[in-house]
Amino acid sequence: MEISLQEIARILDGDIDGDADCLISGMAGIDRAGPGEITFVANPKYAKYIATTQASAIVCVPETVAPGKNLLKVANPYLAYAKALRFLNPAPSESGTIDPGAIIANNVKMGKNVTVYPFVYIGEGCCLGDNVTIYPHCFIGKNASIGDDTILHPNVTIEERCTIGRRVIIHAGTVIGSDGFGFARDGAAYYKIPQLGIVQIDDDVEIGACNTIDRAALERTWIKRGTKTDNLVHIAHNVIIGEDCCVVAQTGISGSTKLGDRVIMAGQSATVGHIAIGNDVIVGARAGVNADVPDGQIVSGAPHMPHTKYLRATATFPKLPEMRRTLTQLTQKVEALEAELRKHQEK
Amino acid sequence: MEISLQEIARILDGDIDGDADCLISGMAGIDRAGPGEITFVANPKYAKYIATTQASAIVCVPETVAPGKNLLKVANPYLAYAKALRFLNPAPSESGTIDPGAIIANNVKMGKNVTVYPFVYIGEGCCLGDNVTIYPHCFIGKNASIGDDTILHPNVTIEERCTIGRRVIIHAGTVIGSDGFGFARDGAAYYKIPQLGIVQIDDDVEIGACNTIDRAALERTWIKRGTKTDNLVHIAHNVIIGEDCCVVAQTGISGSTKLGDRVIMAGQSATVGHIAIGNDVIVGARAGVNADVPDGQIVSGAPHMPHTKYLRATATFPKLPEMRRTLTQLTQKVEALEAELRKHQEK
Amino acid sequence: MEISLQEIARILDGDIDGDADCLISGMAGIDRAGPGEITFVANPKYAKYIATTQASAIVCVPETVAPGKNLLKVANPYLAYAKALRFLNPAPSESGTIDPGAIIANNVKMGKNVTVYPFVYIGEGCCLGDNVTIYPHCFIGKNASIGDDTILHPNVTIEERCTIGRRVIIHAGTVIGSDGFGFARDGAAYYKIPQLGIVQIDDDVEIGACNTIDRAALERTWIKRGTKTDNLVHIAHNVIIGEDCCVVAQTGISGSTKLGDRVIMAGQSATVGHIAIGNDVIVGARAGVNADVPDGQIVSGAPHMPHTKYLRATATFPKLPEMRRTLTQLTQKVEALEAELRKHQEK
């Protein structure tokens, strides 16, 4: 596909400084892009390459000055890059057919243009929206629903009654709606508490590979609009995750904890159960949050503390043995001083 | 289903204080329950709701006093709640049929009333007990056995020769019997050591979603009766986990380690290999256990220490930079004192 | 199978001290081996069993002296053990047939002697080498390639265009080629950056169960020859892992990070993104590496530090509360001394 810079400017809502008619057929990093390709500078440290790149056009911030270059000036070059990449590399269209090698209960409601691959199992009473794509080996339990334009990659399990919104992407191997981990003690033994609730995933959510999101004991485990999870994330029963959150790989969120909107949980972090994390909170990598966190805080460590405090404490940590030695020496010196002074006083 | 409080009392082995004939059709939390519903108070902090709940009956401890209310008094209200929930919400019965869309080797031994969903693969020489349920996309390798009343959720892999007990529940995406991680060094390269043992899972075990339980190098990896694991748990080759243990999400247990009975491993905890953890040990969240732990201890931290010691140390940790400053100041003051004293002595 | 010690010596390239004609039919640990079995001593602490073992032959280091015993002396007994185990327990041969219950696109290129089990899905344009084995419920996306002698265990997902080398083993439930976790901020929302690259896995790699290895944004995520990963490992987009590395269970490697050759990452460790870890580096269990690490270092802790420094710091950590008390007492004593000295001076 060849497209004029003019047309790209229209799509990205940017201003051209240079030749609006130059033709673009692809995209590449600024140090690799050649003629016919568009590149971008989002990070100022790459601005030095603008003068020497062979790219036919450069997406950049409005302040950029580069005589002789074709610039496409936008407010957010990284976002523009992502949009251009999607435009220039459209997802291949799916077949829009239900493969006869899938097994689908009789009373499933199907939208228009649904693609179902072989070896998919869809249980009774399910409801699939328009343009849904279900890859091989997915399981959709009874009375579950999948919204318009949603994609389930291979080997995804959606247990019964769970509801998945529109434009959701669920990566391979993920399990939605497994039983929450709830038991009552019966002497030494554990007695299973039935997990009767569901998982509800709202529109525009993306769930990584091999996530496990447990169904609620009663009511629902709820992932709200726009939230993205990375791989191997565990979300326990009755958790509520707000809108536009970002949960990085191998994080675990314990039962009944509630995240506000726009929360970021960095990799391998975790929370205890039954706490509330406010809006716009950032939880550092490997942090273990064990109590409520107010809006807007950045916390790290386990148990968590303000991030700056954590940085200072961890910087001091390797000096602990040296501190201990100093402390022993000081103790001896102070004892010597005390003895000395006693001698003086006795005189 | 409607049932009298009398009948519930019989099932839960409790005593009624109030109207034994009142009819119950459901269950709800004490702040939400309405007429026709039974609720429960297990946590004393909810006792204040007893006076105002609209529930038709309340499961509570024997000491409870609430004139005008229908009380069902039991020794362990939380356990009674779990039992009532299961009784009032019986699991839907399975078909008891082998779907023709499953592929099952000729010489598989099948118990009575086995349910096998489409897209299940069962290899040669397997043996399934009575009332077993196998959901779609499960794989059962050659010569594996599955005990009575056991349920495999979708996408579960049981590799060859592994044995699963009775009344076991295995959640979706879990892998039982993958090769243990064993290699001999051959210069810089790793030479694979064949993993010839099995995984043995005993009766009444529940395994969460996306667990990985490796087969033994020789002999067996062994999960004993009544143990429960949460999601994304890793259990390495030759590990032995005792009875009625509880292994919370994202925990990893290294090779050949042995847990006693009734051990609790909290979330994201881990052990090194080849150690022994005693009976009734509690391992705190994120703890890293690197040596044997005697019976009954509570340990936290990495490397682990007694839990109370850990709490005190972590409470002091954020104060490290301040301690370091104090230490520097003290050092200067002590030097000044020493100089002062020297002056005195020289006089 | 019975085989003479002479023949085993030939296979393991060792020297016999004793009866070269004695017949061996199996292998066992030195404390359990009986007549007809061969055992081995790799760890010097087991050397004491040599005198009393019932085994018919013992694999051991050349220096071993044990009159009356049949010794097979080799430079590396543990490697010899692994080789003997594989020789004495050859993997059962696969059928070499494509099961009609698999669904394979028309234009897939198949090598010789390929085994494909039922419920396997192989997309258009794929290419499978000789002697490949694909277990049930595997998905191989369009235009992916699988090298000679490679084994995919059940429920493995290989997304489109990924390339898997020769003699690779991928354990059950693993996902290769899920989208990298890449988003551009669009106000509060996340805008998905298409992940257009691939995953390339080279020869002789072994990948554990339930790993997630993301495809690159552009270009490739790359696992080089001979590397082994344990279970539940997460490898983000654009990561490059060198040759003969060992990545232990539940480790996470963030985007664009590069590992050299022969790196060991112990269990539950992690790295931030965009760093370089040199050749022969050892990263301790649970370490969090947040900056480049030069060749040959051993690091632990989060953030990481030299391993010996980490050991000293963690040994001091439990003493923090005691150090703090000492510091308070010293402060008081120094103040008392200062006051005392002022009194002296005022005299």
Image (spheres, coloured by chain):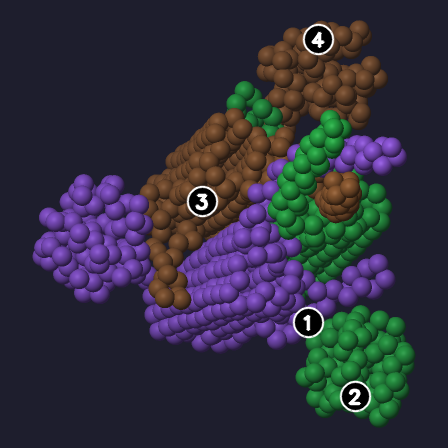
Chain colours: A brown, B purple, C green
Residue for badge 2: C51
Structural distance between the alpha carbons of marks 2 and 1: 33 Å
Secondary structure beneath label 3: loop
Residue A274 image point, x, y percent: 42, 42
Quarter holding the C terminus of chain A is top right
Residue for badge 1: C91
Q: Is residue A174 left or right of residue C335?
A: left
Identify the disc placed on residue A63. 4
Direction front: furthest residue: A347
- Image marks 1 and 3: residues in contact by CB distance under 8 Å: no
Secondary structure beneath label 4: loop
Residue for badge 3: A273
Secondary structure beneath label 1: loop
Residue B241 image point, x, y percent: 53, 67
- Badge 3 local density, few (<14 within 10 Å), some, or many (20+)? some
* Image quarter of residue B89: bottom left
Residue A159 image point, x, y percent: 41, 49
Q: Amino acid at mark 4?
A: Glu
Q: Are marks 2 and 1 on the same chain?
A: yes
Label 2 vs 1, first from the N-terminus: 2
Q: Amino acid at mark 1?
A: Ala
> Which residue sits at x=70%, y=69%?
B194
- Badge 1 local density, few (<14 within 10 Å), some, or many (20+)? few
Reply above or below: B137 against B338. below
